[in-house]
Amino acid sequence: MEIQIAHYLVVAGILFAVGLTGVVVRRNAIVILMCLELMLNAANLALVAFSRVHRDMQGQVFVFFAITVAAAEAAVMLAIIIAVYRQRQTVNVDEMDLMQG
């Protein structure tokens, strides 16, 4: 039995839906960051699946760069979350009002 592109897309859709649900429902900044990464990985899975079906390496190269940017983004966001935690003693996004005047 060969795995079709539909199987990859179903898994990517489920991963994206779980990530989106986590972003909408959760209030912890670290969990929201992890759910955003899950959504990005779902998109990467879809890109790799389409790249494999079309026998083109451009999708896989794009995923490589997307993972690199995502790692940098995660590091910056984690540093911001740590800085906010040190000042406010919370990572609850409802209580983060540092930018308000």
Image: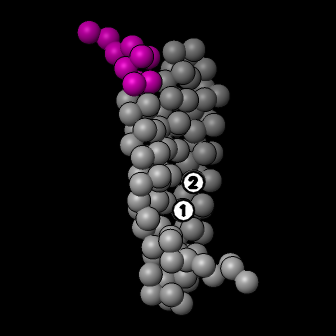
Position of residue 10 measured from the top left corner of the image (x, y, whole percent): 39, 25
| Image quadrant occupied by the C terminus | bottom right
Q: Position of residue 33 (x, y in %)?
A: 48, 60
Pointer 1 residue: 74
Q: Is residue 90 above or below residue 1?
A: below
Distance from Cα at disc 1 to Cα at disc 2: 6 Å
Location of residue 17 with respect to 11 vertically, above or below: below
Circle 1: residue type:
Ala
Q: Which residue is nearer to you in this view: 57 or 3?
A: 3
Mark 2 surroundings within 10 Å by alpha-carbon count, few (fewer than 14), some (14 through 19), many (20 or more): some
Q: Is residue 74 magenta?
A: no
The residue shown at (42%, 67%) is: 28
Residue 27 x %, y %:
44, 65
1 and 2 marks in contact (CB < 8 Å): yes
Residue 35 in sight: no
The image position of residue 75, as x and y in percent, is 55, 67
Q: Residue at x 60, y 79 (%)?
A: 97
Q: Which residues are magenta?
A: 1-10
What type is the residue that disc 2 sits on?
Ala
Count of marks, rendered view: 2
- Report which residue position mark 2 lands on: 70
Who's the residue at 60% across and 29% down the image? Answer: 59
Magenta stretch prevailing secondary structure: helix
Q: How is the image coloured?
A: one colour
The residue located at (43%, 32%) in the rendering is 12
Quarter location, residue 26: bottom left
Dot 2 falls on a residue whose secondary structure is: helix
